[in-house]
Image (tube, rainbow, N blue to C red):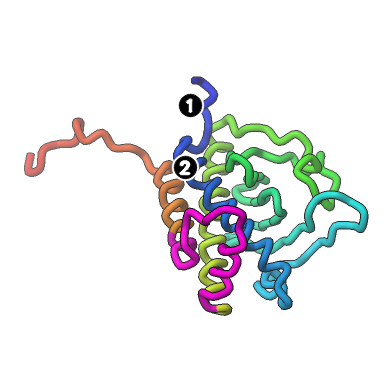
């Protein structure tokens, strides 16, 4: 019980985030196999995985506000608020990475060392910020893909999934923006209206 209370994200947000992240990462996996490699065309840089090594290539780019993003097939690393926050594809539970202990480049999740859960209020706030920024980046990316390729490409990507997508190609960006809003709402203080003065008092 105590560990769930300390988690920076409620279970429903993690569940919905994991669902969306799986869809987006599947689509991004198709984007990088496109003749134009859409991630590169979007401005990210690629660190190719060496031949014979297991894992996935790393794609890096900038985040709003001076942050940085690294994407792999297994998750995303967001550098925001002075912290490095890893958001795994499996579970969507943000954790802190101590980059000084990491040997770069990384092509597997195990290469990130031993990430730890955010514990202090500052760390938990940074974790929520990372998830919100990542969600808004993914929303913007999906809008860019739809604008560039039209809906047909995303329909093709989703149709190739082993099981039906829980969201449509057209709604994916909006779902990410909605999730970002839910995470950002966790940062706002809750006002107990029972203590608010009566109007006109």
Circles 1 and 2 in contact, beta carbons < 8 Å: no
Helix, strand or loop at disc 1?
Answer: helix
Residue 153 falls within the magenta-colored stretch: yes
| Label 1, residues with CA under 10 Å away: few <14, some 14-19, many ≥20 | few
Q: Residue at x 68, y 75 (%)?
A: 41
Q: Position of residue 157 (x, y in %)?
A: 60, 66
Q: Which residues are magenta?
A: 150-174
Q: Position of residue 8 (x, y in %)?
A: 52, 36
Q: Which mark is residue 94?
A: none
Helix, strand or loop at disc 2?
Answer: helix
Q: Residue at x 67, y 68 (%)?
A: 31
Q: Quadrant of residue 102?
A: top right
* Mark 1 or mark 2, earlier in chain: 1
Above or below residue 83? Residue 39 is below
**Which residue is nearer to you in this view: 7 or 155?**
155
**What is the distance, in whole Å, between disc 1 and disc 2 at their CAs?**
14 Å
Q: Residue at x 58, y 69 (%)?
A: 156
Outermost right residue = 52
Q: Residue at x 47, y 57 (%)?
A: 167
Q: Position of residue 131 (x, y in %)?
A: 55, 48
Q: Position of residue 119 (x, y in %)?
A: 58, 30
Above or below residue 58? Residue 194 is above
Q: Quadrant of residue 199?
A: top left
Residue bearing mark 2: 13
Outermost left residue = 200
**Which residue is nearer to you in this view: 179 or 19?**
19
Quarter of the picture holding the C terminus:
top left
Q: Is residue 187 left or right of residue 76?
A: left
Above or below residue 131? Residue 101 is above
Q: Which mark is residue 5?
A: 1
Residue 14 falls within the magenta-colored stretch: no
């Amino acid at each position: 019980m105590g560990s769930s209370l300390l988690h920076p994200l409620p279970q429903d947000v993690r569940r919905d985030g994991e669902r969306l992240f799986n869809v987006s990462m599947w689509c991004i996996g198709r984007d990088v196999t496109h003749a134009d490699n859409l991630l590169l065309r979007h401005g990210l840089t690629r660190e190719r995985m060496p031949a014979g090594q297991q894992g996935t290539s790393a794609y890096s780019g900038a985040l709003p506000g001076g942050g940085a993003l690294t994407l792999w097939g297994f998750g995303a690393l967001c550098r925001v608020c002075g912290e490095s926050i890893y958001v795994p594809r499996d579970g969507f539970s943000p954790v802190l990475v101590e980059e000084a202990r990491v040997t770069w480049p990384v092509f597997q999740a195990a290469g990130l060392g031993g990430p730890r859960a955010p514990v202090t209020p500052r760390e938990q706030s940074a974790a929520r910020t990372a998830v919100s920024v990542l969600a808004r980046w993914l929303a913007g990316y999906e809008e860019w893909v739809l604008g560039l390729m039209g809906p047909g490409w995303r329909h093709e990507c989703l149709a190739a999934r082993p099981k039906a997508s829980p969201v449509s190609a057209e709604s994916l960006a909006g779902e990410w923006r909605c999730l970002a809003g839910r995470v950002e709402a966790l940062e706002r203080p809750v006002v107990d209206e029972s203590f608010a003065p009566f109007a006109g008092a």
